[in-house]
Amino acid sequence: MLVDEIDIIVQGGKGGKGCVSFFGKTDGGPDGGDGGRGGDVYIQAISDLYALNQFVAKNFRGAQDGKEGSSNKKSGAAGNDIAILLPIGTVITDAKDKKVELNELDKKILIARGGLGGRGNAFFKSSTKTTPKYAQPGLRGERKNLALKLKLIADFGLIGLPNAGKSSLLNELTNAAVKIGNYPFTTLEPNLGVCNGKIIADIPGLIEGASEGKGLGHRFLKHIEKVRLLLHCISSESENPLRDYNVIHSELEKYNPTLLEKEEIIFITKSDLVDEAKIKKITKDLNKTKKKIIPVSIHNWDSIQELSQVVN
C-alpha cells in the first residue's frame, strides 16, 4: 500500500542543562560548564516512493537532547541531528501553511532546530557575583506539526476512466508487473515504470465527480500535476469515446485548470478488439479534441513499438 498523505510531528532536541559546580568545595570559584545544544531535525528526499509508510505505526520523530554541562567548565555534548527520509515529490506544510517541496534528491533541509544548551554557573561569575549557585536549564527544541503530501514526479502520466487499459500498457512498456483485471479500480494506487529512461505513472481510474472526492480520483489527481505529458487512454470498447474524454477533462479542469495546459496524446486502447471501421469512427469523433491520436494494442508489437517512441 502506498501512503501518499500523512501528518507527522517533529521536534528538535532539548538543550542540556548548565551545571552548578565549584572548584574544590562550595567556597571555591564556580566551574559549572554549559549544556550541549539539542540536535536539529532535517528532511531529505530519496527515490523510495513508499517512504511515507514508515509513519503509519509511529508519526513522531525527535532529535537527540543535548547533554548536561559538568564541572571543570566542561560543556555537555551536542545532541545528534536526525535526517527524516521522505519520497522525492513530497510537499510539506506546517501549521502556518508554509510549504516546502522536495524536488532534489539527497538535499538536506533544516525543518526543526534543536534548543540551546543552558549556561553553567561559571558563565554568571562577575565582580559582584563571585559564587553564583544557579545555572540555566536547556531550551526546548522546535516542535512542528507537519502535513506530508506526496506528488509523484514522473515524465508521463497515464490517465483515463477505469478499465481503459492503462495498467496493461504500463506493464507492456516497462515490465512493471501491475495487477490488472476487468473491473473498476483494479489499480488502487499509482504505479510507476521506466521506459527509455523515462518514468511513467499509471494514475488510478478517474470517474465523473473525482475532483469532488468520488471514487479514487480526488486522492490521486495531485499526482498528475508534475507530469510533462498526459497519455489519455480511451477504450475502443467505449460506447461514447468523446464523452469519456470530456469527463476526464472536466475533472482535471475542476481540480486544477493548469492541467489542461499540459501536452496530451490520446491512445485508443484495446484496438485489437474492434474492426478497422470502428477505429476510424472513434478517431473521427476524437479529432474534435485536436489532440494527436494513436490506436494501440498490447497484442500488436508494431503499435507498442510506436508507443515506446512516443515516450522516448
Image: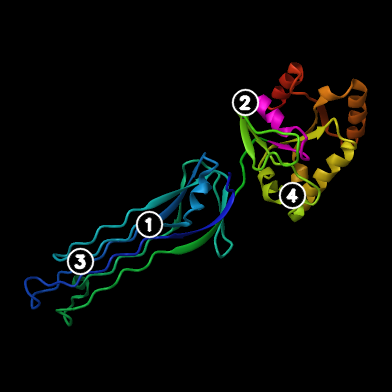
The residue carrying pointer 1 sits among few (fewer than 14), some (14 to 19) or many (20 or more) residues within 10 Å by Cα, namely many
Q: Nearer the viewer, mark 2 or mark 1?
A: 2
- State the residue lying farthest toward the bottom: 128
Residue flagged by tag 2: what amino acid is it? Asn
Q: Quadrant of residue 115?
A: bottom left
Q: Which comes sooner in the sequence, label 2 or label 4?
A: 2
**Residue position marked by numbered label 3 in the rendering:** 33
**Residue position marked by numbered label 2 in the rendering:** 175
- In the depicted structure, whether residue 280 falls above or below residue 211: above
**Residue 122 image point, x, y percent:** 18, 71
- In the depicted structure, whether residue 129 falls above or below residue 262: below
**Residue 259 image point, x, y percent:** 74, 45
Picture colour scheme: rainbow
Mark 2 residue element: loop
- Between marks 2 and 4, how big is the CA–CA gap? 27 Å
Q: Residue at x 77, y 43 (%)?
A: 261
Mark 3 residue element: loop
Quarter of the image that includes the C terminus: top right
Q: Nearer the viewer, mark 4 or mark 1?
A: 4
Please state the extent of the stretch shown in magenta in the rendering.
157-176
Residue flagged by tag 4: what amino acid is it? Gly
Q: Which mark is residue 63?
A: 1
- Between marks 4 and 1, how big is the CA–CA gap? 40 Å
Q: Which comes sooner in the sequence, label 2 or label 1?
A: 1
Q: Which comes sooner in the sequence, label 3 or label 1?
A: 3
Q: Which comes sooner in the sequence, label 2 or label 3?
A: 3
Q: Are marks 3 and 1 in contact (CB under 8 Å)?
A: no
Question: Is residue 294 on the magenta stretch?
Answer: no
Residue flagged by tag 3: what amino acid is it? Gly
Q: Quadrant of residue 12?
A: bottom left
Q: Which mark is residue 215?
A: 4
Residue flagged by tag 1: what amino acid is it? Ala
